[in-house]
Every structure is written in structure tokens, then in C-alpha cells.
Amino acid sequence: MTTSTQNLPPLAVHFIWHPSDKEFIFNIISEFRRYITRDTDRPFSREINIPTFLYSSRNPSNPPKNTPPKLADKNVVFVFTSGQTLTEPSWVDYFNKLGGSTDYFIVPVAIDEAGMKHSYSGTLKNYNFIRAHNWPDDNRIESGILELSHELYRYGLNDINSNEVGKETSIKLFLSHAKKGDTGLNHAQEIKRFIDNSNMNRFFDANEISPGFKFDEEIERHLKNSTMVAIVSDAYSSRYWCQREVLTAKSEHRPIVVVNSLEDYEDRIFPSIGNVPCVHVTAETLTHKDILRILIASLLETVRFKYAEVSLKFYQSQGWIDSKASILCRPPEVQQVVELLSKNQSSSNDSGRLHLCYPEPPLYQEETIWTDYLNITVSTPLWSSNEEQTEKYNIGISISDYLEDGYEEHHQHTDELQRLSQDLARHILSRDHTLIYGGDLRENGFTEFVLEEASVLKERLKSDQFNVKNHLAWPLYLTPASKEFSIKYYGLLDIVKHQVPGDIDSILKDKEIFLKPDCPENQYIWSRCLTTMREESIENSDIRIFAGGKLEGYLGKMPGVLEEFLIAIDLNKPIYLAGGLGGLCQKLCDSILNNEICEEFAEGWQISHNAGYIELQQIAKGNSFEANYEQVETSLLNLSVEKLSSESGLSKDDYIRLMKTHFVDEIVHLILKGLKQRERNLGES
């Protein structure tokens, strides 16, 4: 795993753990990742999307094959220690290698008492450990998320150096509530009491308005450096000072979390309280778990807000965003825009049309129609309301997951491929391109993720232009699950059912019966049908995008993504090859960049890693349809980055970055950049 030391994004998070400790700690890591990365089950959410990397191994005696590199400007490394890591010399040596780098902040987390002994010597000597073994059983996950989130904020976003242990790093909370009525006041007192009487005071400093101060001055003084927790009770929205506190927090561009504790009814939700995260709790006395949920939401929104700010500024410095655009950490609001327009008008400098940029994903037309009336440009790093486009492409994507190696050598979760497929679907379809995908129709498959995106986009953008074509080889479209899937997404996608190739047609008894690939002869039939489907679907594509891909455990004459890549090369299709997310495409990129074939693309490797493959090859050779790995080697060695980049619209340097980057946003940005340049080139020709 490598990266350029230039133009690094602001933050990356790394997790290191011993495989024998997985049962205890991996659910905490997974849950924490769910909070700090965009949830693939909620692709339109506005959550944090910090890149994360995982380090472990399959063999308890062996540590990961490499240590975290400097992938971002700031790298926070959570090192989970235990008796397992303490008594394995190879793991002790691995941890000591971490001490030779100044590229990251190390946060040690002791899983058990023995894990604390790493502080006696070596790299982790004298470090202050998070004590995971002290997390209470009934709130273990919440306690873990809270502590990990605070250290992420402290080292990743609070401009603290590792030696500045005395620096104030607690997050200031401003508890906003109606002073009349019991619910809001009681909840605020319960939250503050919980913080003051527990170790939470290491993480939070909770404030209300102090007696004897001028109310408006005190609000402004506290809110300028605070995260606002608005405890919404029945009376909240009708109180002038509650409204004033919300408006001040919005005007000061502060993180805000709403705690909805309605007991009965409120006759009007204060409009300015929207556009922020919301936690629902009971109007009754808060439980400790409720308070932890509120504090976690407050901490994570603070992290999200700060991360959005530094990320957007980074993207602006890289030219993704107009240099004159105003950066917003939330989607734009009318009152905020009015303030900005007023400042522009009073300014002596004529800054022209107001341009606002906010984090991904883009809002939809119904939400932003008012910006057109105010003559405002709104954008995200990957989209702008003033984009002009004339070319419409048939864009095929070849993205599939692969067998993880226990994070021993490749250190990203395969859900990054799901995020990529979702983001590509969103941005390709919203630009009126046609999306072509070849794969089985099944629940939780990549096709389903793409179609969920297309379904929502089609409804919310009120357009009939979207088009998704799913190419299916025989006999995939004969399964009951595929038929049900087709009914579910009727009217959204065009299912292209490919017929059996001629040389196979004569040996099939009944083409209406699903044929299981349960013997070499049937596997050969499947391989021929898959090849036919791939050739025809790629022939009908203008552009092809590749990422991930299995190297073993596939159905076909060779790994599917490899076969599709070779067909696209033979047909001279423009190709965007993303290798940084691992899988077969990483091996393709390595082979092309190093001009040396990876061992996985040899027939011997495929035979040794795929049961029954030698029998399949023998049958295929008898019919002259075998996978020819000598031709694979020749094709890859004759392929250059210059050729790939010239067809894609990207410079050579940009294309190499596409092949290497581990960041989904950057992959999508480079693909969209290439498509725009291709359109310019066509316009000039």
C-alpha cells in the first residue's frame, strides 16, 4: 500500500489488532467504522466519510505484512494490545516498527490488563492507553465509540501534537433548552450531572447560560466555540431565546445536534432547527444509554463538521472546487444565503455570482430550486449546478468484491467497493448517462446497490432519462430470485437476456431449466455463456470502469473482471482502471505499471487456487475455447499507461493516480474529470 507524499487528503484512520482478539474487539471497530464512514445501507445519508484502513492477519503468529503508510496529512492509528500481542515476539517487533515513523499519531487501546504492559518498553512505552477492558458490559459499544471518537477528534482534527498532553481537548457543549417546563431543563441537568460525575468530563465541558450575565452576550460568547445540543421539548420552538440560540449557532457556523424529547405536541417546528442530526429520547428521565447516545451524536457531529471543513478546503486547494466558492459544512439554507448575499453586496469587491460548496452527496432538485431564483451556484466536490454537458455515454462498470486476506496485505474493507458502485451510479445516472452492468440479480449484490440508487434518483430528480441495463447470461435469468428481482425493479432497468451461444445450443436438452454449475461439463457451458454475455455487453459500451474483482472462486473461463478487461482492450474501449481498492484490479495495475505479470495471471496459479479448474480447461481446450494465459501475458505487457490515459481523457499522472488511490472520492473525481475532458476533445475535433 503506497501513496504519493504530495497533495495528501486531511485525515485517515487505521486499526491494528491481533486475529485472536477479533471476537472481542472487531464488533467495536466495525460499529465505529459505521459511524465514521458513509453507511452503505443508507447511501444518501450525510455522515462522516473518513477513509479507514484495517491491519491484522490470518495466522496468529504473524503480524500484518506492512505498517500504515502516510496516506493522509494526519493519520490516527488505533493499536489494540493484549496478552496475545505481548507474548508473540513477532507482534512486539511489529509494534516497535511503528515507533520509527513520525507519519502518524498512535493511540494504544488495551483489550485486557496484559495489554497495558506494552507501556513498559518499546514503541508504546509511557503511552497513555485507552482501557477497553474497563468498558462496562451493558454500554460497552457506546463507551468504545465515545472514547475512540474523542481520540480521533483530539489527534486528527484538533491541531494537537502528541506531546501536548496538557492541551484542552474536551468538546464544549452548549445545552440549549426551554427554561419553562420540566422536560428540557431536566434533561439538560441530567446530561450535565452525568458528565460532571463520570469520566466524561475528560471529553466534554457542558455549559448553560450563567446567572448575572447579559443573555445575548453570554449566548454569543459560549456558542462561538461550542457544539450546540438543542433539547427540543414541547415548549422549545415557541421560546424566543431558544430560537435566538439556534440562530446564533447557525450564524456562527457551529455544529448542532437536536435531541427530540417531545412529550405531546408542538404547534410549529422552528425552521432553523432543521438540516442537522437528530436523536430521539423519551420525555421521561434519561437512562445512561440515552445520555451516551446524545454525547456520541454530539461528538461525532463535531468530528463530521470539522472534517467537512478541512476536506472541502483541501478539495478547493486541489482545484476540485471553485477557488471563490464559499465553504459550507452543511447543505445551504435560505437564511444563511441571505447573510452571505448581504455581505457580498456590502463588500467593495464585486465577487460576482455567489457560489456555495457543501459536502457530498448532492441535494436534489426539489431542495435546491430556490437557489435558481437567487442566481446562486451550489455544488459539492463532485457535482455543480452549473455543469453543462452534451455527450451521453453508455458506461459499463465491472466492479465485484473479492476474498479478503484477513487484512494481512490489503487493508481496506470490501464495502469500499459498494461505496464506489453507489457513488458512480449516483453521478453517472444524474448526468444522463446509461449505466451498463453485467451480473446476477440477487439481494445484497452490487446490482441491487446500483438499482437502489437509480430508483431514488429517478423519483427525486423527476427524470425519465435514466437508464440502467443489466446484462444476464443464460441461465442466470431463469432463477426465481432473478425473476422476483426483475419484478421489483420493473420500469427502472432494461434486462438484456443473452441467449446460449451456437456451439452450446445443440448440447442442451432444455434451455428453460436452470443448469447448476456442479460439474466440469456444466461449468464449461456456464463459461461459454458468460463469455458471450461479456463480449456483447462490452461491445455496446462506450466506456468501461473496473475495480475490485475476484482472483479465485469465480464462474467462467477465467476471473470475470480479467476477462471483461481483456475484451475491452481488444475492442479498444476507453478504460478507467481503479486498482487502489484491491482485488484483481490491483494486480492488473501492478502488472501494467511494473511491466511484469503478477503470478495470479498464470494458468498454474489459477489451477492451484480453484478446485476443478484443470478439468474445465481440458474440456475448453478440446473445444478451442480455453483461457489462454500466454495471450493474457502478452496483452498486459503490451499495454501502457500512456495508451490507457490517452483514451480516457486523463493525463498520464492522473491515470497513475487513478490506478493507485485508495480513496473513493478521488476515484470518482478522476473518472468524471476524464469524461469531461473527452467531451471537450470531441467538441474541438
Image (tube, rainbow, N blue to C red):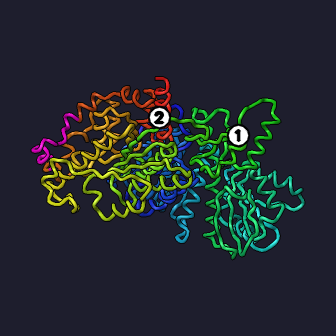
The label shown at residue 646 is none
Question: What is the quadrant of the N terminus in the image?
Answer: top left
Dominant secondary structure, magenta: helix
Instruction: Evaluate whether residue 609 shows in this view.
Output: no
Height in image: 483 above or below 567?
below
Dot 1 amino acid type: Asn
Question: Could you tell me residue 541's position as x and y percent?
Answer: 36, 40
Height in image: 600 above or below 572?
below
Height in image: 592 above or below 600?
above
Tell me the CA gap for discs 2 and 1.
27 Å
At x 22% / y 61%, what residue is drawn?
512
Classed neighbour count for the residue bearing mark 1: other residues with Cα under 10 Å, few (<14), some (14–19), many (≥20): few
Q: Nearer the viewer, residue 624 or 462?
A: 462
Q: Is residue 472 left or right of residue 165?
A: left
Q: Earlier in the sequence, mark 2 or mark 1?
A: 1
At x 69% / y 48%, what residue is drawn?
370
Q: Is residue 662 magenta?
A: no
Question: Could you tell me residue 261's position as x and y percent?
Answer: 69, 70
The label shown at residue 675 is 2
Dot 2 amino acid type: Leu
Residue holding disc 1:
375
Please tell me how many numbered marks the rendered image carries: 2
At x 41% / y 41%, what residue is drawn?
395
Q: Nearer the viewer, residue 637 or 499?
A: 499
Q: Which residues are magenta?
A: 616-631
Instruction: Evaluate whether residue 646 shows in this view.
Output: yes
